[in-house]
Image: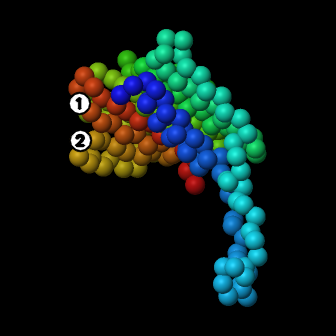
Amino acid sequence: MSLKTIRTIFTAAAASLLMIACSSEEPTPEPNAKAETPAEQPAQKAPESAKPVNKIVERMDPDGKGMHLTATNPAGKKFEASIGDEVDLPSEFPKDVPVFPGSTPMASMSSPDEGMIVTFKSDEEQQAIFDFYQSELANAGWEILEDPAFGNRLAFDALKDSRKVSVVVAGTKGDSRVSVIVTPNN
């Protein structure tokens, strides 16, 4: 797959996530109860989430191995995404969520009020990574909720304060992927 194709897919996915992350929580107005057909119903104002994005900044790494997208909607909500061989952790990545030693972040998406997802690559086997996250999160005061194994993936959730972290480990030794998802616990 060419870098141009990857860039197009990434931009489309990031834009879709931006609209979700930056959408308004305002309820849609109820239609006029007396109107019998859609043509008789009063026109409704477009929902806040349908408003266009105010600003999008896209940049490629000088070596062409990564791409970064920053966007802000009219309400001022921000969304950031990065993908590449090695990306930086989001600046708001929680200090009490560990990073598996020797792993490299290869993708991240974040929105301050919505949470973040960071995907790491590692040469270690799945079970060692899974065990590390369960142990380290428990040691940092997180309550481990689940331990479901499905297919060739290992996953669990943990809670602390008003936050939830989900860890999903997939792949094989020499080519493991770890997704760490941190969200508000609503």
Q: Which residue is depicted at the point 54% across and 12% down?
A: 62
Would you name the residue on which mark 2 appears?
152
Q: In which quarter of the image is residue 166?
A: top left
Rounded to the nearest whole Å, what is the CA distance between mark 1 and mark 2?
A: 9 Å
Q: Quadrant of residue 71?
A: top right
Q: Find residue 151 and report its horizontal and vertical position in percent.
A: 23, 46
Please, what is the three-letter code of the amino acid marked with disc 1?
Answer: Thr
Marks counted in the figure total 2
Residues tagged 1 and 2 counted as in contact (Cβ below 8 A): yes
Neighbourhood count class around disc 2 (C-alpha, 10 Å): few under 14, some 14–19, many 20 upward: few
Please, what is the three-letter code of the amino acid marked with disc 2?
Answer: Asn
Would you name the residue on which mark 1 appears?
172
Q: In this view, does 51 lie to the left or right of 135?
A: right
Query: Quadrant location of the N terminus?
Result: top left
Residue 97's place in the image compared with 104, above or below, is below
Q: Which residue is depicted at the point 76% across and 44% down?
A: 74
The reply to whether residue 47 is in sight is yes
Q: Quadrant of residue 105?
A: top left
SS for tag 1? strand
Q: Find residue 152 and report its horizontal and vertical position in percent.
A: 23, 41
SS for tag 2? loop
Q: Which residue is depicted at the point 68% across and 57% down?
A: 25
Query: Quadrant location of the C terminus?
Result: bottom right
The reply to whether residue 93 is in sight is no
Q: Find residue 80 and report its horizontal and vertical position in percent.
A: 60, 33
